[in-house]
Image (cartoon, helix red, strand yellow):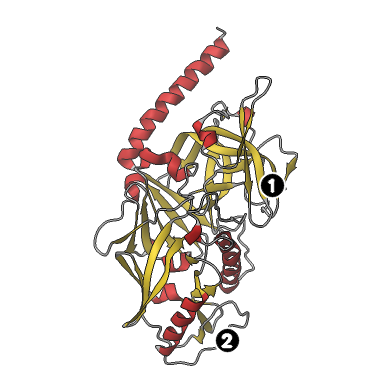
Amino acid sequence: MSFLRLFFTLFLSVLCLSGIYLTEALKGSGFSFELIHRDSPKSPFYNLKETPFERLRNATRRSFKHANRFDRKSLSNLSAAGDQADIISDSGEYLMNISIGTPPFPILAIADTGSDLIWTQCKPCIFCYMQQAPLFDPQNSYTYKDVSCYSGQCASLESSVCLAWFGHDSCLYSVSYGDGSFSNGKLGTDTITVSSTNGSAVPLPNIVFGCGHNDLGTFDAKATGIVGLGGGDNSLISQMGDSIDGKFSYCLVPIVSSKINFGSNAVVSGSGVVSTPLVAKDPETYYLLTLKAISVGNKTFGTTEGNIVIDSGTTLALMPQEFNSRLVLEVSKSIDAAPVQDPEGTFDLCYIADSNFEPPVITVHFSGADVKLSSLNTFVPVSEKVVCFTFKGVEGSAIYGNLVQANFLIGYDTQKQIVSFKPTDCANE
């Protein structure tokens, strides 16, 4: 055996052992890292010339595009064999800095709780969208491996194809998005490294991801892929599995970078915590809750809609038209002021923001959990003088967006199948 081969054999053995020890270490300590809001100064999408109002307007436009993933097939019918809701490319609100490979290669990817597969563009990439950052080259990573087309990892991906001839054994993936964009390439495994908020690097060995060699559509040149945080087998959350005890949480600040926590750091406990079950569904990607009713002040009215997606990539709280019309009517009755028109026609209810404006207390009643919203969750400034209601009527399924999630520590326990809410000053977390 040559010295070079011996060196790499020992090197890979050490990496395998370190992966085992890492899993045990993460179970005991947990970790957190930054979620970069795409409109924050830390983001490459940040536009210094935009006002805060323009950023909010742009976020709401992206919100509708992002929500289209759920519209074409109602989520209430996803249990039917073969049904799968469409997803939309490049429309998330948060980014993550990660690294792939050994040595670590930096990636800035869109964090998406509405999809599973992690993917980035890889060399060689002849038919690819223009990307400003360099492409990942799997040949430069000592820890990269192609996923076998006969493996369970390949079988768990619905849109996979087996390539096996003349000694080749590769699993090919294909992801299509609702706007016509797509990513095609090889499925591989490698070490993904994230930078913890305490300054340490956390390596996650043997993570399955897509190495895109044919990626075209509406992808933005400033981002370098997608990190799926959904509930399916190939998401980053599911792949970390036992090492984080199935737990993650986040505490969102509007249009500002936030934190996402894993393992013991993600436990939501203490005074004011309420929890609601996750709804079992097929596919497992989306996090669904049961919406029972909404209260405006002392008046409560129920809904027969049932399932609502909780999604950090959607800005507004999107409700079915009929239900939202009732909600808007009740809110307007409780405000002693005349509504004004939203000049852009985006929002369903707006008011002049002055000292006399007092919005009502709104409580969202999930199954087993009553979440009392603050006025910062329910009305947002869209200009210097106008504030608008963050609930919007749409044709399609209900989505609990990130504005109504702001200033709550929200924890997901995929083992116990619950989501927990705790009122929190997220800016000081």
Residue beneath disc 2: 341
Identify which residue is drawn at 58% across, 61% down.
66
Report, in whole angstroms, how far the alpha carbon at label 1 lies from the one at label 2. 40 Å
Q: Residue furthest right?
A: 126
Identify which residue is drawn at 51% across, 64% down.
255
Callout 1 amino acid: Gln
Callout 2 amino acid: Gln
Mark yes or no: residue 46 visible: yes
Q: Quick check: 84 above or below 126?
A: below
Identify which residue is drawn at 52% across, 76% down.
321
Counting from the top left corner in percent of width and height, residue 262 is at 38, 47
Q: Residues within 10 Å of mark 2 (few under 14, many from 20)?
A: some
Mark yes or no: residue 429 visible: no
Counting from the top left corner in percent of width and height, residue 403 is at 46, 68
Identify which residue is drawn at 39% across, 56% down.
279
Please give left or right for residue 419 compared with residue 86 in the image: left
Residue beneath disc 1: 131
Please give left or right for residue 419 compared with residue 120 in the image: left
